[in-house]
Amino acid sequence: DVQLQASGGGLVQAGGSLRLSCRTSAFTFEHYSIGWFRQAPGKEREGLACISLNDGDPYYADSVKGRVTISSDSAESTVYLQIDSLKPEDTAVYYCAAMWRPYSCLLVSYEYTDWGQGTLVTVSS
């Protein structure tokens, strides 16, 4: 199993930015894809972005494209999610998750086998 630790959430004003971190325990970091998802109260889980760690190829959901950047640092076994121009509707618990897939990541939550505990992002207006 892959252990994931999400961090970096907090309270931020609308228009601000946050960088979330997902530290992984994966020994074979490059064999995985990491996805970022979020879930707001009363809403379904939403996929935001993923990255295949073998080639660093990212994929973004249309709903956040242009405001979100996913990146990875293999030396730190960590994946980051930069979110810019935050809006109150971005308020949610943000999760990172892993799947065994070195290329062409997918933003399909049920394909991910290992999940972090989530980090809360609250955007005030």
Image (cartoon, grey):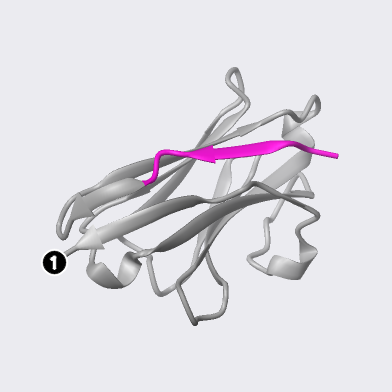
Residue plotted at (30% across, 45% down): 18
State left or right for residue 2 relative to residue 85.
right
Picture coordinates of residue 8, whole percent (x, y): 40, 39
* 35 over 31 or under it: above or below: below
**Outermost residue toward the right in this view:** 1
Image quadrant where residue 56 sits: top right
Picture coordinates of residue 86, whole percent (x, y): 24, 59
Residue plotted at (49% across, 56% down): 94
Question: 10 Å neighbourhood of mark 1: few (<14), some, or many (≥20)?
Answer: few
**Outermost residue toward the top in this view:** 75
Q: Quadrant of the N terminus?
A: top right
Q: Which stretch did the figure color magenta?
A: 1-9
* 118 over 27 or under it: above or below: below
* Residue under label 1: 125
Asked if the magenta segment contains residue 7, the reply would be: yes
Residue plotted at (78% across, 64% down): 111
